Amino acid sequence: MIYFDNAATTFFKPKEVIDAVTATLTASFNSNRGAGGRKAASSVFDTRQNVADLVNCDPTRVIFCAGCTAAINAALIGGNRYGGHVITTVFEHNSVIRPLKEMERKGVISLTILKPNNDGYITEEIIERSLRPNTYMAVFSHVSNVTGRAQNIEKIGETLKKHGIKFVVDGAQSIGYLPIDMKKCNIDALCFPAHKGLHAPQGLGLMCLGNDFNPTPTCFGGTGSDSKNLYQPDFLPDKYESGTLNHPAIAGLNAAINWWQNSKNERLQKIKKIQSYLHEKIEKLPNVVLYSSKNDSGIISFAVIERDSNEIGDILFDEYEIATRAGLHCAPLTHEYLHTIENGLIRISLSAENTIDECDIFINALTKIIEK
Amino acid sequence: MIYFDNAATTFFKPKEVIDAVTATLTASFNSNRGAGGRKAASSVFDTRQNVADLVNCDPTRVIFCAGCTAAINAALIGGNRYGGHVITTVFEHNSVIRPLKEMERKGVISLTILKPNNDGYITEEIIERSLRPNTYMAVFSHVSNVTGRAQNIEKIGETLKKHGIKFVVDGAQSIGYLPIDMKKCNIDALCFPAHKGLHAPQGLGLMCLGNDFNPTPTCFGGTGSDSKNLYQPDFLPDKYESGTLNHPAIAGLNAAINWWQNSKNERLQKIKKIQSYLHEKIEKLPNVVLYSSKNDSGIISFAVIERDSNEIGDILFDEYEIATRAGLHCAPLTHEYLHTIENGLIRISLSAENTIDECDIFINALTKIIEK
């Protein structure tokens, strides 16, 4: 099988990650619970430090969540200022759009969804035009999961800071592909999953908080701390982490970050090279329209004129054993903006495990499908 | 090391479970996302069916959550009827108490916390005395994580049904130890973790819903379904499951349930036998007060007169390498009720991996500590 759906989940997990997960299952302690849990707690803290170093934030402000979606919900729902105005963009995944639309429907926020300029970028001017006196939060994806385009989050962060607006970034498709510096970009909450570009297990997401953003907790329970207190403790990370942590995935993430730091230069170069190769090949195919540019996130999206993307995705998988992701990619507003809502797009998303040979096999397969 | 803290997390995970987790990491698909995700989706559905068979509910009403705490929060916050009255008990863990106290503090519910009769049971009479015209929900733990005592949930469910009150059960300490039949007990939401009595990985909890209980979702995002819809889909399980599922833990749970079903008779007998042995031994020690009776959940709790439990727990771990759980066990109201809030209790919680030899080593160690 050729796996071209790494933006959904990276197929390859390094041996170091699998070993770290297995080690926690071979001797299962409960972090921060009882004397035996101290070792697990220290391994969990190591991971916090590793994540903090990766994105430049305080380790006690690294919050483990069930996934990137849970992290985004915790930031948006927990960060809500009743009656305020939130801005976001057409490039958002349903993990951002659905909580915001729900909040809008309940009447607790008003919502503006920004379209980019003709080059696909959300500029300072576009942001400033949308602001209202009660705008308190902006939610932006760093990289679109459909087009692979990265927004200039440093510039956006600067603009938002000028207006005192909290900046929540969905890093789902950029973490592990592009550097993110929370302090440099004035990010108040950076949310990302473990299981994509970092090659760690599924079931874990991060909400990394800037020093001036303290959402209200949205989940309450035992923390192994301050147990006499019938209310959630107010100190971090316990304020936002109730119940037993996903220690296997946390240990896996720690190993994954170490592995990634050691191999990233070579890997990112390879992804860039293959993305570029495939981009050029697909560009030349008849009846194919590309919706992505050359990019560092390994994403290529295209449509075949007058063909349903899901049909083509199914043929690629069933007849050629090539796993792509066809359809709307949980990003309906992006597809509306691109006018691809009807037939969707076929998305290829690469990892450094992919090869030029696989690209050639894919191009041959796609050529045959188009000719049919 | 002797591990006596299985109520926090069972230390032992069967080879079948570790193999199932490893298999998902060796070939990581994203359930329900893209053509390649169909295989993962089918493995996830198998687990739903397996859980449904275990507790007697509909498989589409088996909801995967980040843990038992997240499951309880989803049921309590999602099931909230604004301004209504909720009853619960002194035996609840902070995973129940903290969300309820938070809801009470916000003024969205009023709350009554029931004390048991002299035998430690919450009876029909106690429940009925507490009811108000607007009582809409009751939240009960099946087995206390401090005393190991099981409430009669069948009788309680019958009483609640008579009054049209939703019945939420925290099965954290009973799943894998006692049978639970949701239909027979009229349970509307049964919440339990994967990582305790079922010996599956941490990071996964279940909210199993009865057919007449449909909480409002509390987390929103991509479901890989109905992607054009900017709001959360209304069908189950997608209504309650946003974002990438914890496939490694779900596959692990499936293997764990199969393993547990095959070995439960022998294992539960062994736990009962060791619990009883240890109970009788501890009962005879001078200056020790037992707070648990003989039970099927493998829990034994005791205090040493005029000694701090945390100190004794630390000595047991540091000097004898025996992991127990000392303190308040995230259940402050239980300790208030037992008058043990000051010094806490030492809790032993067994699994079938423990042995009579380990019990004898423990008794020798405890005897020496008491004599000091």
Image (cartoon, coloured by chain):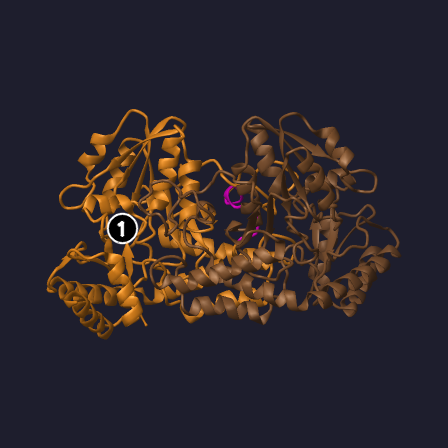
Chain colours: A brown, B orange
Amino acid type assigned to the residue bearing label 1 in the image: Val
Image quadrant holding the C terminus of chain B, namely: bottom left
Q: Is residue A54 visible?
A: yes
Q: Which residue is located at x 79 percent, y 42 percent?
A: A120
Q: Indicate the position of residue B160 as horizontal and vertical percent values.
A: 28, 35
Q: Indicate the position of residue A65 as horizontal and vertical percent values.
A: 51, 50
Range covered by the magenta-colored residues: B237-245
Magenta stretch: residue A76 in it?
no
Q: Chain of mark 1?
A: B
Q: Secondary structure at mark 1?
A: loop
**Quarter where residue B307 is shown:** bottom left
Q: Is residue B325 above or below residue A126?
A: below
Q: Which residue is mark 1?
A: B143
Main secondary structure found in the magenta portion: loop
**Residue in front for this viewpoint, A263 or B293:** A263
Q: Is residue B251 visible?
A: no
Q: Is residue B140 above or below residue B347?
A: above
Q: Residue furthest bottom?
A: B357
Q: Which residue is located at x 41 percent, y 59 percent?
A: A31
**Quarter where residue A323 is shown:** bottom right
Q: Which residue is located at x 61 percent, y 68 percent?
A: A259
Would residue B199 be found to the left or right of residue A8 on screen?
left
